[in-house]
Image: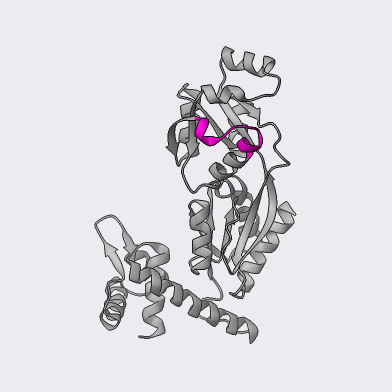
Amino acid sequence: MNLKQLEAFVKVVETGSFSKAAKELYLTQPTVSAHISALEKELKVRLFIRNTKEVTMSEAGQDLYKYARQMFELECQIAEHFNIRGRDSANHCITIAASTIPAQYLLPDVLMVFKRRYPEEQFKLVETDSSEVVSQIVDGMADVGFTGTVLEKKYCRYIPFYKDKLVIITPNTDRYQTLRKEGGGGISWLEEEHVILREEGSGTRKEAQKQLRRAGIEMGALDVIASIENQETIKRSVRQGMGVSILSQLAAEEEVREGHILAFPIPGADAGRDINFVYNKNTPLTANVERFIKVIKEIYG
């Protein structure tokens, strides 16, 4: 096993393609394939599951990726300490894991400013649910994460940088317009509605459960007809009258502004849930990641 083989392995993981990895490493595709085959032979495992459309890591590949990333991060730290250009110091790829709300509504501004300020930097954004974000940070699969839920995992440090409110969204029909005018701020009517929720594991769903409980409504009392991962699908379903939902105010504000849906506040809600960036406090941050975090603080601090 050598660093060239591990470098080829990491590039295939990060690009999702043998051909793209070869291009970035200035190697031929057969050379990259040979490096991977040599690793698989030496470790006596299968690192990738290949089909005609994509390349995904096996369970053994995921384990190796954790160790390989740590090795290359350490190499970058050595290069930075001695003020030399390491293997990948010029274009280290920052891997970001983010839940839906920060990925879609907060990070685009951060990434734009960061790329303008540091044009040589590269980043990879993985959008997933909050629990998986934390898992990727713990396992060393991501440099920094963004989540609306704090999960008690050792080694994780959470830093809040944005307040996000939840709202109940409904179709913009006469019935709900009247309800908003005459409802007096209460939401007991929610128990009579068909409700569409985000998927299990999402920070939005967990926060909705907490805020509804404070408002006197248990999740078990709701007629939940669907759990949907994609919030654009949820908003479209609400517009078409399939049911009502509870989403981030950030996610709903454009449709509310354009009059496609209505938004109701949740009584007793506080200033909003924290959106946090999270990192593994036992893994020293590279200069690239520290610069990225600095940009976040400048924009939302």
- Pick whichever, 194 or 79, lies toward us: 194
Magenta stretch contains residue 287: no
Residue found 60% across the figure and 74% down from its top: 282
Q: Position of residue 203 (x, y in %)?
A: 56, 47
Vertical order, 200 against 175 (above or below): below
Vertical order, 297 against 177 (above or below): below
Q: Position of residue 253 (x, y in %)?
A: 62, 33
Residue found 45% across the figure and 24% down from its top: 242
Determine the image quadrant of residue 145.
bottom right
| Residue 259 visible somewhere in the drawing | no
Q: Is residue 42 left or right of residue 177?
A: left
Residue found 53% across the figure and 65% down from its top: 137
Assign the N terminus to one quadrant of the image. Answer: bottom left
- Pick whichever, 111 or 221, lies toward us: 221
| Residue 92 visible somewhere in the drawing | yes
Assign the C terminus to one quadrant of the image. Answer: bottom right
Magenta stretch contains residue 216: yes
- Pick whichever, 215 or 257, lies toward us: 215
Vertical order, 188 against 219 (above or below): above
From which residue to which does the magenta span run?
211-222
Q: Position of residue 60 (x, y in %)?
A: 34, 71
